[in-house]
Every structure is written in structure tokens, then in C-alpha cells.
Image (cartoon, rainbow, N blue to C red):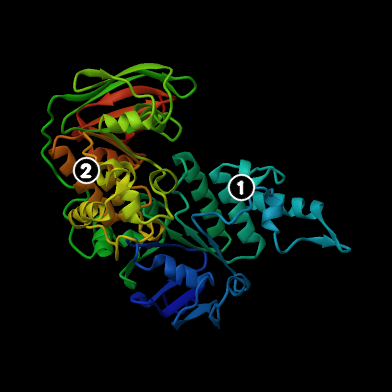
Amino acid sequence: MGAEKLLLEMTGISKSYPGVMALKNAGIELRHGEVLALVGENGAGKSTLMKILGGACPSDSGTIMIDGGEVSIRSPSDSRNAGVAVIYQEFNLVSSLNSHENIFLGKEKTFFGMLDRKGEIAETLGLFKRIGVRMDPEEPCGKLSVAQQQCVEIAKALSSSAKIIVMDEPSATLTPNEVEKLFLIIRGLQAKGIGVIYISHRLDEVFEIADRVVVMRDGENVGLRDISKIDRKTMIEMMVGRRLDHEFPARNSKIGNERIRVEHLSREGAVHDVSFSIGSGEIVALTGLVGSGRSETVRLLFGADRADSGEIFLDGGKIRISCPGDAIRHKIGLLTEDRKNQGLVMGQSVLHNFSLPNLDRFSRFSFVSSPKESKAFSKYVDSMRIKIPHHEQPAKNLSGGNQQKVVLAKWLERNCDVLIFDEPTRGIDVGAKYEIYLLMNELASAGKAIMMISSEMPEVLGMADRILVMHDGRITGEIGDVASATQEQLMTLAVA
């Protein structure tokens, strides 16, 4: 690096909580105009390190240097004054306010003591122009798409003269086209000398956008590499702390008789004449671009939405599903795409979440047997390696991977024969992903029929026995020879 002055240098950062050492002598260094990826498993310390930089929590020890000078960051205002902006995965926008009101909230422009709305609108348009987007600054943020809200957050950061912008999982809910637009914005920020810290579980994006990568594990730095001098396999092994010969576990598919068949399923404006089948022991991937009708299709299958027409057959017999209760009685389980809002009651304990669809199994004369439900849950905690300190742990305090395991455990307790995984690894780190893949393989080996919805092409190609591709509410292609399939082939069908 020579005598190059760093934009940011965090060294010797440590942070402990009761019973937990979150950071141990951690740190990062960021150059002017650089995109630095920060990767690691959930719980590796990434978020804690960025909370310290953002002033959300103080460190126990360590130093922070910005542009060669030491700074003290003990609050969010200290962080902003030092030129740091953190764009969290959950945006900090007031949905009822429009773009310029959110951007200037708490720092309103005034003219002779009066609110200068015209000045705010003009400056907001200038900020939007800087990042290459055209948006109405008076549109309420609650009506904006996720990608547009992200642009407002970036504009808000620039309005505070931020020279360091932290993006936490910025692409988690974006379409591929929106991700490309985000990358264009990031490259524009780079050209202006702004440093970007990019946190993501999507390693393909890391290799595309980052200049260097910092890998964290168990609260410590385990490596800083130029992105051109590290490969995907090495990065994953650094993250999980063990050798991984394959990103996706191998299995021998033994596909049995047809378990479930769907014929001509339709719902106006969403799903059009969809037909497919899944055999015992088979993993069928349903893929396509966001908005293609994938989630809408499985919601019809699970009874969460009412179909206009179509028939469903289970083990050769026609069944009627008009609500989720019908699906559950027929041993069909759905792991929803949004596990936080639809799969779990976040404020409730993991034990209560596990028990919700299984109360009939744990109760007698309308009284729930706590020892019975606790014993049943303990079995899955052990077999699925769910990391919790106790059964009363609130679901909101678990990592994404452990939340997903709790959702899966409740359906396994119902002994579901058909399991639908909607984006099973979204927001989950590499190590936890591998465990979810192993569980899916074990379920298939036990004769379960599995449908997996995924936007990640490598995941689809790595896990599926057969692939169905959707576009505009219709199945546009089926791939049986998955071993020979390519991402380009899937994308061609997805945009057909």
C-alpha cells in the first residue's frame, strides 16, 4: 500500500456482552473510492462492527481513524459528523413522508425561518441526478419500490456529505435488473472517491462489485484479500473455518412414485394454467424472475390464496384445498419466503412457534402439555443443531439460519409428506445454507416430495433433480437434465 492514506482504519475493536464476546481485536481498512466487501457467517461480528462505526453501540476498546485522524464515535450523530452513513437492511424511512422530507428530516432547509420546500426539492433532484436516477421527490416513500427506497437512502447519505457508506445486504429483495442498477450507482460513488463497505451473503455479487474482501469469523478478522486473488471456495472455507469440498452436498436421487400433481391451476392476474408433478424423494425447483408467479403458485397449492380453477392430486387421489388448514391436514407444509412476517411470530418463544401448528398433538381436553411439547422440540433442537440457549428464546433473537430451522421443525413434527421451501436460504450465511441443503437432502431420502423456489441460479442447479421455469404466471420450460443445464439456459426461459 506504500504511503497511501486510508479513508478508514478500524483497529483493535473489541466488544463483549454478558456471556458473549462479539468482537475480538477486529478491524477493517478502507481506501478512497474502494468497494470493500465484508463477509462472514451470521454471528461472525459484521453487524456489531458496523454498529460501532455507525454509532449505534460503543466499542469496549480500539481506535477508529478517518482520513488519518482519530475520531470518537459514541452516537449516530458522531458517526454522521465524521462522514459515515449506514444503510441498514431495514430502511430508516418514514413511509408517510416523501423523498425530500425523509432526506432532510431533522436538518430541514429554511428560508427566513420558514421551511424551504422548494429548496429541498431542488436539492433532492440534484442528489438523484448524482446517483443517476429519475424519481419524483414528492412521492410518499411508502409507495416507492424497495429499489427506489434504497436510492432515497443513498441520496440521504450524500446529503450529509458522507464519504463512507455502509450497505448491509443491499440486494436482498432486489430483482437482478435492480441489482445491476445498484451496481451502477455504487460505481458512480467510487468515481467520486466515496468508500463503500458492502455486506452480503451473495458471493457472486461480492466478486462482481468488490475490490477487496474482509472475512470475519467468530468476532475476528480471518483474512483481507484482493478480490482478484481469492476464489469462491477459499472464501467459503475462510468463513466457515473448515474445508468444504463442495458448496452443495451430493446425494443419490431415488425418485419414487408420484406424490403430488397439480393440473391447470389458475388465479386471475397471477397464475395461468400451471401444471406439474413431484415424485417421492424428488426435489423440484421452481424458478424465474421476481414477479414471475412462483410464490403465487405455491400459495394456491397451500390454500393461502383461493384458486379460480385447477385440480390437486395427492398420492393419486383428488383433494380439495381451500385454506391452509386443509393443506396441513393433507400433510403439506409451506416454509414461506418471508419467515419473519409469515413463518414465525417473532415476539413469541421458539417453543411456542414450533407448537403453533401442532397444538392438537400436545394437548388434551384443551390443555397443552408443556413437558410433551418441550420434549418434542428438544428432539429437533438436537437433530437439526438449532443454536438456542433455551426454549423460551424469542424467535426474533435467532439468526436467519436458526429461524429457518425452527420453521422447518414445526412442519416436520406434523410429518408433512410434501414440503414447499420458498427462498429457503435468503439472508442466510454460507455455513447455515449448507446445513439447510443437508436437511433437504435427508427429507428427500426419507421419501418426502420437495418443491424449492429460489432466485439463486447456482442453488437451483446445485440442489434440484428437475427444474421448472416460470414467466408471467406460466411455466415456460422444464429441465430434466439438470447436470447439463446452465444459468444462461435458465435465464433464457425466465425472460421468454
Q: Nearer the viewer, mark 2 or mark 1?
A: 2
Task: Name the disc covering residue 440, or none.
Answer: 2
In this picture, residue 433 sits left or right of residue 398: left
Judging by the rendered image, the residue that carries numbered circle 1 is 132
Figure check: 158 above or below 404: below
Residue at 37%, 68% in the rendered image = 45
Q: Looking at this view, name the residue that lies furthest to the front.
A: 365
Q: Is residue 12 above or below residue 363?
A: below
Instruction: Point out the tag, 2 or 1, that comes first from the N-terminus.
Output: 1
Side of 89 where 373 appears, left or right: left
Mark 1 surroundings: few (<14), some (14-19) or many (≥20) residues within 10 A:
some
- Residue 116, picture quadrant: bottom right
Label 2 and label 1: CA atoms lie apart by 42 Å
Q: Is residue 139 left or right of residue 488?
A: right
User: For the residue carrying disc 2, how many other residues have a C-alpha within 10 Å: few (<14), some (14-19), or many (20+)?
Assistant: many
Q: Secondary structure at mark 2?
A: helix
The quadrant in which the N terminus is found is bottom left
Looking at the picture, how far across and down is residue 390, in whole percent? 29, 64
Q: Is residue 263 visible?
A: no
Identify the secondary structure beneath mark 1.
loop
Residue 224 picture location, percent across and down: 34, 69
Q: Nearer the viewer, residue 235 or 112?
A: 112
Give x and y (percent) for residue 109. Answer: 78, 61
User: Please, what is the three-letter code of the amino acid marked with disc 2?
Assistant: Met
Q: Residue at x 48, y 39 (%)?
A: 177
